[in-house]
Image: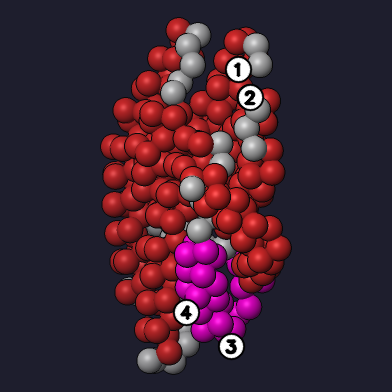
Amino acid sequence: MSQNKSLLFNRLEVIGFLLYFVILFCERLLALIFSVKSGGDYALLSGNGFNYAAYAVTAASLVAGTALAVKPCVKMIRCLKRGEAFSFETESTFLSVAVFAMLFGGMMHTGFTLAGVQFAAYGFLIAAFIVRTVETCKEGGDKFLSVLSVVYLTLFSMTVPVCYISFMALPLRAVFFAAEFSAVAVLVPSFGCMLGYFMKKGETLFSPVFPILTLVLSGLTVGLQWQEKINYFVLIFLALTVVLYLALGIVAWRRQKNQRA
């Protein structure tokens, strides 16, 4: 692949990550400002204990995510200005930690939430994944693993349940809250781990641990919420993720193991 084309791919990936951080930062900052009194049952001052937890996680996520994102974002902007390539291979770990730190806040439904804006941020991140896949294929990487990776990563990211208020009777409500917060606490870093490996290697991790975790944690969250509301979004993507892994992910995992042997 020519140097100019390689640099173009790199710039597109950089822009995708930068837009993810900027858009999600702005949306979550507005959430912190306007969720104090806005949002009815989801307003911070509504007195519902869920909102205190969601607001605290959002605030901590915004602070931590921003602090962690500053260094890689400054490097990416400098590379754009200088016409240089940003090294995703060496910066992948730090960058992925910043991504999932910011993502924690995005998984909290607050009084002021702009779902469309959040999806736009995630869309730019996924666009960066797609460009990374094209780049890997052009450079002679394993096309099967790379293409499967971007599909698998996208589906997996959609299985993480957003934390919502429940009005179920106790103790079931407490169990549901524990399930949805546990799902976010485990699956968001799992996604970050898969993302970091993907940006470094051009293919993600196909360990069976990740689909098992999402099947158990997201499945439990959807199941507990069933009597109140069926979360079709998570349910559909959970089914697609598990089916994809059973159909092709196991093959990819064995292929990776053989390549390392």
Relative to 58, say whether 128 is above or below.
Answer: above
Does the segment drawn in magenta span residue 48? no
Cα separation between marks 2 and 3: 50 Å
Confirm whether residue 61 shows in the render: yes
Please report the bounds of the magenta region as a residue range.
208-234
Real-space CA distance between mark 1 and mark 3, rounded to the nearest whole angstrom: 51 Å
Real-space CA distance between mark 2 and mark 4, rounded to the nearest whole angstrom: 49 Å
The label shown at residue 139 is 2
Question: Measuring 32% from the left and 74% from the top, which residue is drawn there?
Answer: 49
Q: Residues within 10 Å of mark 1 (few under 14, many from 20)?
A: some
Residue 21 shown left or right of residue 1 in the figure: left
* Numbered disc 4: secondary structure: loop
Tell which tag, 2 or 1, sits nearer the viewer. Answer: 2
The spot of residue 209 in percent (x, y) is 47, 64
Residue 241's spot in the image, x, y percent? 64, 62
From the viewer's perspective, is the residue at label 2 or at label 4 nearer?
A: 2
Q: Amino acid at mark 2?
A: Glu
Q: Is residue 221 magenta?
A: yes
Name the image quarter holding the N terminus.
top right
Sequence-first tag of 3 and 4:
4
